[in-house]
Image (cartoon, helix red, strand yellow):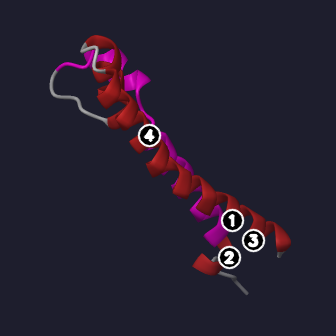
């Protein structure tokens, strides 16, 4: 009579949403910079990248942090693309 939604049925949607949230969380910059101006020990990768590159004139560390952010985001994006392709082929 009633059919319950099980996790295997909604797995592709859950994966897309979770990976999108993870990518957005890693790249958050505008909210932190606007609300705190980088003060009050707000320290996320994107904010630290900006602070080191443009405020402290330490371009080397800023570039290393940008590469770190890239390395953190790329595997998540690749996993997301693979899951989308796998769900389209079903």
- Cα–Cα span, label 1 and label 4: 23 Å
Residue depth check, mark 1 versus mark 4: number of the one nearer the observer: 4
Q: Residue at x 67, y 66 (%)?
A: 83
| Dot 2 or dot 3, earlier in sequence | 2
45 to 54, vertically: above or below: below
Q: Is residue 1 left or right of residue 76?
A: right
Give the image quarter of residue 33. top left
Return the x and y of residue 76 as percentages of the image width and height.
Answer: 54, 56
**19 drawn magenta:** yes
| Dot 4 or dot 2, earlier in sequence | 2
Q: Which quadrant: the N terminus?
A: bottom right
Q: Residue at x 69, y 82 (%)?
A: 3
Q: How many marks?
A: 4
Q: Secondary structure at mark 4?
A: helix
Return the x and y of residue 87 as percentages of the image width and height.
Answer: 76, 69
**Residue labelled with disc 3:** 86
- Cα–Cα span, label 3 and label 1: 6 Å
Q: Secondary structure at mark 3?
A: helix
Give the image quarter of residue 38. top left
Q: Is residue 5 left or right of residue 38?
A: right
In the rendered image, the residue lying farthest to the left is: 40
**Residue labelled with disc 1:** 82
In front of the other: 16 or 59: 59
**Residue labelled with disc 2:** 9
3 to 40, vertically: above or below: below
Residue depth check, mark 4 versus mark 2: number of the one nearer the observer: 4
Answer yes or no: do the residues labelled 3 and 1 have beta carbons within 8 Å? yes
| Dot 2 or dot 1, earlier in sequence | 2
Circle 1 Cα neighbour tier, 10 Å, few/some/many (<14 / 14–19 / ≥20):
few
Residue depth check, mark 2 versus mark 3: number of the one nearer the observer: 3
Q: Residue at x 24, y 32 (%)?
A: 43
Q: Is most of the magenta stretch helix, strand or loop? A: helix
């Amino acid at each position: 009579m009633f059919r319950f939604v099980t996790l295997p049925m909604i797995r592709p949607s859950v994966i897309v949403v979770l990976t999108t949230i993870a990518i957005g969380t890693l790249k958050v910059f505008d909210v932190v910079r606007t609300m705190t101006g980088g003060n009050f020990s707000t320290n996320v990768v994107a904010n630290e990248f900006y602070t080191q590159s443009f405020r402290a004139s330490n371009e080397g560390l800023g570039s290393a942090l940008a590469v770190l952010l890239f390395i953190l985001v790329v595997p998540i994006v690749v996993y997301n693309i693979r899951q989308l392709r796998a769900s389209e082929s079903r």
